[in-house]
Amino acid sequence: MPGIFDQPDDAATPLTPEERRDLIPSHIANRDELNEAEQENILRGQSWALRRRRRDVLNEKFILGLHKQMFAEVWRWAGNFRQTERNLGIPFYEVPSALRQLLDDTKAWFDYKSYSPDEIAVRFHHRLVQIHPFANGNGRHSRLMADLLVMELGRERFSWGRANLQEVGDLRGQYIMALKAADHHDIRPLLAFARS
């Protein structure tokens, strides 16, 4: 019988054997159970973030804390920068400095009114995905970060296609295509997808 990590999952970043050993729930036997456990933890993390009266979204401590809240009941490495290379994202040793640069850039976009609130949050999301700071959960974390940021800027939360992108293949494909367009400096598809 194949193990949990032998089952393909196009929605997840492949984990190293060391990262796989950091799975906390011992009852998880298949990918569906892992996705369910992560989703329950993500909902608790979302609740934690939304009920905080004061949150400094553009702060490294908050970013790490949110990831920990979203995944700490499933993964021991939750809330810590990845320590391994990935097939996407920047080299792991550049993550802290790239994140600080993103935070500074985002503050400048806001201060100088470089973009609309939606575009600031979507550009933040895109760059955070490009950095890929965590072993896994980067897309889900960065979408929630963008939601929190756009809400701080006085707008409604994004809808992101109104579905769980982990489960809806065609919608996930649209999201990936929008990210790729943003990689090529066309942010419009990602802006539209965020509000779809």
Image: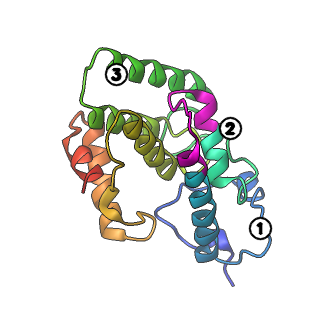
- Helix, strand or loop for disc 1: loop
According to the image, label 3 marks what residue? Answer: 110
Question: Residue 91, how many percent across, how many down?
Answer: 56, 32
The residue shown at (68%, 38%) is 83
Q: CA distance from mark 3 to mark 2?
A: 31 Å
Q: Three-letter amino acid code at disc 3?
A: Phe
- Helix, strand or loop for disc 2: loop
The C terminus: image quadrant: bottom left
Q: CA distance from mark 1 to mark 2?
A: 22 Å
Above or below, comparing residue 171 to residue 53 in the picture: below
Q: Is residue 53 magenta?
A: yes
Q: Quadrant of residue 80?
A: top right
Q: Which residues are magenta?
A: 48-64
Q: Three-letter amino acid code at disc 1?
A: Pro
Q: Nearer the viewer, mark 1 or mark 3?
A: 3
Q: CA distance from mark 1 to mark 3?
A: 41 Å
According to the image, label 2 marks what residue? Answer: 83
